[in-house]
Image (spheres, grey):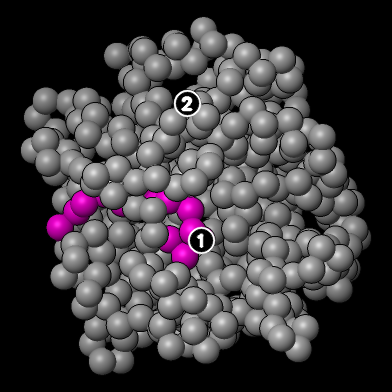
Amino acid sequence: MSCMSLPLPTIIQGGMGVAISDWRLAKTVSQLGQLGVVSGTGISCVLTRRLMDGDLAGNMRRAIANFSLPEAVQDILDRYFIPGGKAPDAPYKSTPTFTLTASGFIDRLNAIANFVEVFLAKENHNGVVGINLLEKVQMPTLVSLYGAMLAGVDYVLMGAGIPTQIAGILDRLSNHQPVSYRLDVQGAAPDDDVRVHFDPEKTFPGISKLVEKLKRPKFLPIISSSVLAQVLLKRSEGAVDGFVIEASSAGGHNAPPRGAMKLSNEGEPIYGEKDTVGLDKIRQLGIPFWLAGAYGHSAQLKKALAEGAAGIQVGTAFALCEESGMESELKKKALQQVLNNEARVFTNPIASPTGFPFKIAHVDGTISEKTVFDARKRLCDISMLRTLFKKDDGSVGYRCPAEPEADYVRKGGMIEDTVGRTCLCNNLMAAAGIPQHRKDGYIEPPLVTAGDDLANVGRFVKKGNTGYTAKEVIDSLLGEN
């Protein structure tokens, strides 16, 4: 059944990266009749690390075996699969970094990684599954979408930017057509046109003959203002099927406040009346919308429905449920702090290399502690959040404000932009239980991101229990318990 003929979900499970919204969580939510969402952020690195850990349950290899071109996946297994898993203290092999000229293996790896995650989330049931991507992570986007579409993904959700190109790209990829993506480049002139290209037939020869026309998934941009909604509808290169309206109380990246950045006495961005979404204008657009940001309560769902929303998106409540991909001991520690009334979330205006405010939960032993932050040696080896910049000679370079300060400044960056930055790539991989082990014995520390609603997730823990399930979250939100 096409997702177009299915009823709209009341609850969208937030697409939390890296691998917190993994296939197990998305599958569970989908089987319960709501929209389960996998995170596509950094998923090629996630797949390779799972393979290097031995894929003990065989899930990765089972999904890979269902890819239409067996020869395309064998190279991945040859490079990364370690029977029985690597030694616990051995470093993971690195995965290739996306560049303007990279193609071939890196495209195949990323497409297949997205295929694997969506395939497993959709396996053996008829529910709907979405994938969440970040506009700020642009270079993998084309192959990520294609891999997810090969697995039959039903929805694409994208935030952290203005994704005007995505809808049209989905239209073309559904017909296996070549596509390109205009990239943001710092210092570029208005007439500069820097793109990454992807041709499905070149990357996967014969794929269009093996696989019929692909289902075009629904596209839901994640936005924070009615102005942005109107811009997307006007400038989008294809159909926008709805919006997720996300307030600054949501976890992960938040849209910056409109106007000049002002900070509270605690150092958090101050959001004002200009940052309030005008739902009257959203309703006038005549397309479905979901409200997000501290909506993890049945009363909030009722309020959203009364406002004309199709439903809500909830992330934080699912982040700490049993099925989420968060490392189990870290999850227990974070939830225990909630139950002890010690939960604290700080909207950090400078931590993310993207420059967007980023929510960080204070959890013992994580990068939220100054001693843990200070102990980490700066390096950039996953490079998802690198920024493209125009060099003096007109060519394009790559830099990240979380890389070593000297490297960033040598590439023309300003030293003040490096202050307080953390490597979200490594921190979030660690939160998903796949931290890099350095040769000197250092283990990358995790970071937990959560919305302002974190303090309230204890409501889902029933008396006598130490945790809760995704079903208990959904039942509570729907008022069924």
Closest to the observer, 336 or 122: 336
Left or right: 30 as drawn, with respect to 420: right
Residue hosting label 1: 354
- Image quarter hosting the N terminus: top right
Residue hosting label 2: 273
Left or right: 157 as drawn, with respect to 276: right
- Spot occupied by residue 68 in the image (x, y as percentages of width and height): 75, 63
Q: Residue furthest top?
A: 306
Taking the magenta stretch, the answer to whether it contains residue 171 is no
The residue shown at (60%, 61%) is 137
Left or right: 175 as drawn, with respect to 399: right
- Spot occupied by residue 23 in the image (x, y as percentages of width and height): 49, 49
The answer to whether one can see residue 300 in this image is yes
Tell me the CA gap for discs 2 and 1. 24 Å
Amino acid carrying mark 1 in the image: Thr
Q: Which mark is residue 398?
A: none
- Spot occupied by residue 363 in the image (x, y as percentages of width and height): 19, 53
Image height check: is 342 above or below 304? below
- Contact between labelled residues 1 and 2, with CB atoms less than 8 Å apart: no
- Image quarter hosting the C terminus: top left
- Spot occupied by residue 369 in the image (x, y as percentages of width and height): 19, 62
Residue range highlighted in magenta: 352-364
Going from N to C along the chain, the mark reached first, 2 or 1, is: 2
Image height check: is 209 above or below 290? below
> What is the quadrant of residue 454 in the picture?
top left
For the stretch drawn in magenta, what is the main secondary structure?
A: loop
The answer to whether one can see residue 51 in this image is no
